[in-house]
Image (spheres, rainbow, N blue to C red):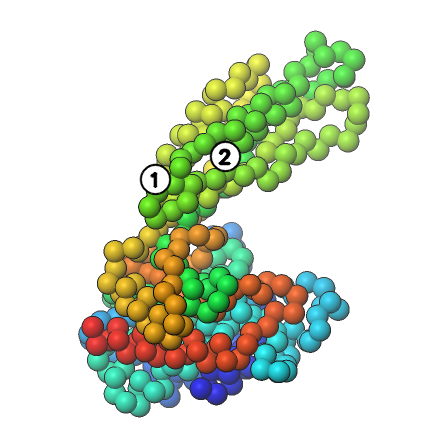
Amino acid sequence: MSQALDLLRDLIRCKSVTPANDGALEILQDFLTPLGFECHMLTFEGDGSYPVQNLFATRGTGGRHLLFAGHTDVVPVGDEAAWTHDPFSADELDGVMWGRGAVDMKSGVAAFCAALPELVESGEADKGTISLLITGDEESDAVNGTVKALQWAKEQGYQFDFGLVGEPSSAEEFGDVVKIGRRGSLSFTITVTGTQGHVAYPHKANNPLPVLSKIAAQLSDATLDEGNENFQATNLELTTIDVGNKAGNVIPARGSMHGNIRFNDIWDAFKLEYWLGQQILAVPANGCDVELKIHHPVSRSFVSNDSADVDLLIETVQKHANITPIRSTGGGTSDARFIADYCPVAEFGLVGKGMHQVDEQVPMAMVERLQSVYTDYVRAFLES
């Protein structure tokens, strides 16, 4: 079991704040290569984002094909002076390992990798194909990471039967949640343009702010749906309303608002764009120009509720955690949204309470439990 902790310690000490790698992927390559994995270091760039290093490692050519996905990039540490321990020290105290990425999600990557030697040594790994896709860009743009690595894998002829993402899925205690899907995410901007003028002569101007505020109220009061058996209700949140006017005696020329919709599988990007347009048209423009802009890419919703491999994951987690995991589609987005275009996918990992926080830390015993779950799951998957 110490292999997972040794690997985690080495990974935490890499200052791999997105998109920096700082040797993290090389550590994994050095671990996997002696186990018979063929490792491909993939660097993608362009499309308005920064260059990103990714690792695709694969072993086997037949049988069922399991894809494990994760990331070694981490969010910035914030105020380093507020940390009790150096965020890249991997200090250990009272059974806890400290450091940025300890929860999200270097522990998941380390636990899965450490689960493999036992299966290779026993020959069980030879019953199928195991691949790992580890990106350096999950926490930020996610443009030159998993999505392009999957496209590359498809071009090489790889096909996957199931995807397992090691994100910290557990909510309150280890094993209480398995993520079987995620809501989609669509961001938008609405800009209303009128005519600038002096506040003392409103008849010579056309103030866009009353129109903008009425559109804001229209959107905030609207109900998109009530949810369904797999998902909670879709919600729309306005995040900013901006005018940029610092003069108290000037009617501004324009104002804009930004918002985000987290949507279930009732909706897609085209339906939501039409719905937003209808809400805007319900508000009189009073001679102003109103523009709606959808920010791409839009993250789609997905669910893998009817997969036998999800059932197998639930059974495996239940055996080790002594509780029955809830099948959840809550939370934000993850790279599982990209994998869902290629095969059914689920997420299981640590309790995620401390992720992105100051003094991020993980109980070392929990990392070892996660390794045990992954070992048994890969074994059962390849035999099924």
Would residue 167 be seen by someone viewing this image from the given angle?
no
Furthest residue to the top? 203
Q: Which residue is pictured at 55% across the width and 82% down the height?
A: 10
Q: Quadrant of the N terminus?
A: bottom left
Choose the circle earlier in sequence order: 1 or 2: 1
Task: Return the residue nearer the eye: 371 or 243.
Answer: 371
Q: Determine whether, in the image, residue 89 is placed left or right of residue 6.
A: right
Residue 354 in picture, x, y percent from top left? 58, 65
Furthest residue to the front? 322
Q: Quadrant of the C terminus?
A: bottom left
Task: Work out how far the residue at label 1 is from the one at label 2, CA to CA, in angstroms.
Answer: 21 Å
Q: Which residue is pictured at 62% across the width and 82% down the height?
A: 94
**Does 144 sit above or below residue 201?**
below
Residue at mark 2:
293
In which quarter of the view is residue 308 placed?
bottom left
**Does 102 sit above or below residue 344?**
below
Please count the marks in the image. Answer: 2
Which disc is residue 368 wearing? Answer: none
Task: Return the residue nearer the eye: 348 or 280.
Answer: 348
Q: Which residue is pictured at 72% across the width and 64% down the height?
A: 79
Furthest residue to the bottom? 121
Would residue 290 be seen by someone viewing this image from the given angle?
yes
Give SS at disc 2. strand
Residue 285 in picture, x, y percent from top left? 55, 17
Give the residue type that dot 1 points to.
Ile
Give the residue type that dot 2 points to.
Lys
Give SS at disc 1. loop
Q: Which residue is pictured at 40% across the width and 30% down the height?
A: 274
Residue 70 in picture, x, y percent from top left? 44, 68
Residue at mark 1:
266
